[in-house]
Image (spheres, rainbow, N blue to C red):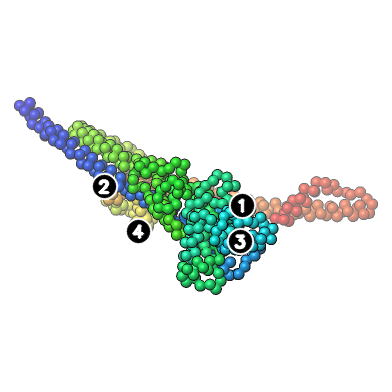
Amino acid sequence: MAAGVRLVCLGRPLKRTLLNPLVLWLVPVLSLSLTAYAWYAVTMSTSARVEERFRFRTDVLDSSIHERMKNYEDIIRGVGGLFHSSDSVTRDEWQQYMDSIRPDVFGGGLQAIGISLRTPAASKASLELCVQAEHLPFCVWPAGARDEYHPIVYIHPFEGANLQALGYDISAEATRRRAIIRATDSGEPTLSGRIRLAQEDVLSAPQPGFVLYYPIYGRGLPTGTVAQRRAALRAVVFAAFRARDLMESVFAGHHWDVQFEIFDGEQAREEALLYRSTDARMAAAAIEPASLLHREVVTIAGQPWLLHVAPSPEFLSSADRSQPWLVAAGGVVVSLMFVIGLWSSATVRQRAVVLAERMSGAFRVNEAQTRMMVDSIADHAIFRLDASRNVASWNAGAERMLGYAESEILGRPVSGFSTDPADGEDDTARTEVSLTGRYAKEAWYTRKHGDRFWGAMAMAPLQREAGGVPGYVVILRDDTDRRQAMEALADASSALEQRTVELGRFNRLAFGRELRMIELKRLVNERSVQLGMPAPFDLSFADGFEDVRASEGES
């Protein structure tokens, strides 16, 4: 019979044990499914964020190049305006105008700004003589017979390697000549293809270059058609650049976390390379992910450039790479924790019930012991208030101090023995206790039979729950003797202060009399000396009195 009862009692735990494997499999499967979705979502979000950051980098590269070259276009337009406004510009006027341009324009890739004069073959010799008359070593070069020449007659800054470019015929080379023709036909600033500057022979670290041209037409000549513009061409303003120095100046050596190449034209040919931010050529196959490879043809002053941008090895931060896998690892860990938690819950539930019963019994014993301890305190009134500030418990010390038995005071408001109107008229004290956890004050309290005593009261909430503060514990101490002692001490202190004031007044009167006696003795001594008799009084002791009198006068 006993064995049968035992089998029945164990039936339900055994059934739960059979169901646990299903739960233990279902929870991790759902958790891993959520983990896979979170991994996918974080991967997509990270990729989108990385691509957006990469597009921002490429836009900044593109806009930086366009902005810098637009500034140079404005400069050579201004130089063109100088020559268009005058039939002849002297070298002094040229120098004054160039000195007015900000010095920081030159350098950083801009090698020179100059003027080439369109010169028919018949006028070549006279031009050379005219410039040489200004004491300049001028000669049109390179040698060779051509229908017309475009020698450089003005160049700034006129120093260093730029001295070698004086007299260079910019139309002698095919790439330059094509750019000059395009500028003449359009009337707009036009960029040449990749060239080698005439100054490059004497410059260190040779590098590719290019030139920006702007046409100057004869004053008053028609320029409505291409043929008219070609016939009216008078001179050409140019700005010569060293490609690598210019790009390093534009980006100040900071390419963030991308690498890029710039090619002249629309093809990534090594012989057309203008600038490369890295030492080695970028390999498109090595770029991961492939969506972070940007190829764009940009047009600068009529000349196409191929901009090839790719992320550097540092572009993808460790957080970008590891964040999806951290999410996945976290999901797996959470799944394992679910399994372990469910398994632990299934095995320790019964022990938790037993432990709770034991704790409940211990709590009841502890509550009784606490009640005995509180009742044993004779010199303090300790009682509990409910949320409405009515008395809910009453110890023996409270009964002896206030005269109320527990049966008389339970359920009555605390204001019944307090002389402070605030205890029954507002909730200030209760609000302060709820917010700060404590409240204390001293006031007059009335015992059951009407006599008063000075009490020190402290109040604190019993516990805090979502529904508010369910009650308060109050400790009240009779401090009448201490208050009377403090009042007696205050009266004695006031009397002592009054006596001190009177004593000070007497001292000042006595001190004034002594000072007048010293003054009379000094007058007698002075009169005796005048009559030829010795001074009758010794006043050496009076020096200190003089100092005291001086300080009294100042005060």
Residue at image x 69%, y 58%?
135
Q: Secondary structure at mark 4?
A: helix
**Label 4 neighbour load within 10 Å: few <14, some 14-19, many 20+:** few
Picture layout, residue 80 above or below residue 282:
below
Amino acid type at image mark 1: Gln
Identify the disc placed on residue 164.
1
Whether the residues at callouts 1 and 2 have beta carbons within 8 Å, the answer is no
Q: Is residue 159 left or right of residue 108?
A: right
Residue holding disc 2: 407
Q: CA distance from mark 2 to mark 4?
A: 25 Å
Residue at image x 31%, y 48%?
45
Picture layout, residue 501 above or below residue 321:
below
Q: Earlier in the sequence, mark 3 or mark 1?
A: 3
Residue holding disc 3: 124
> Mark 3 against mark 1, which lies toward the viewer?
3
> Mark 1 against mark 2, which lies toward the viewer?
1
> Mark 2 against mark 4, which lies toward the viewer?
4
Residue 547 horizontal/vertical position (percent): 76, 50
Residue closest to the far right: 532
Q: Earlier in the sequence, mark 3 or mark 2?
A: 3
Residue holding disc 4: 425
Residue 518 horizontal/vertical position (percent): 81, 52
Q: Earlier in the sequence, mark 4 or mark 1?
A: 1
Q: Secondary structure at mark 1?
A: helix
Q: Earlier in the sequence, mark 2 or mark 4?
A: 2
Whether the residues at callouts 3 and 1 have beta carbons within 8 Å, the answer is no
Q: Secondary structure at mark 2?
A: helix
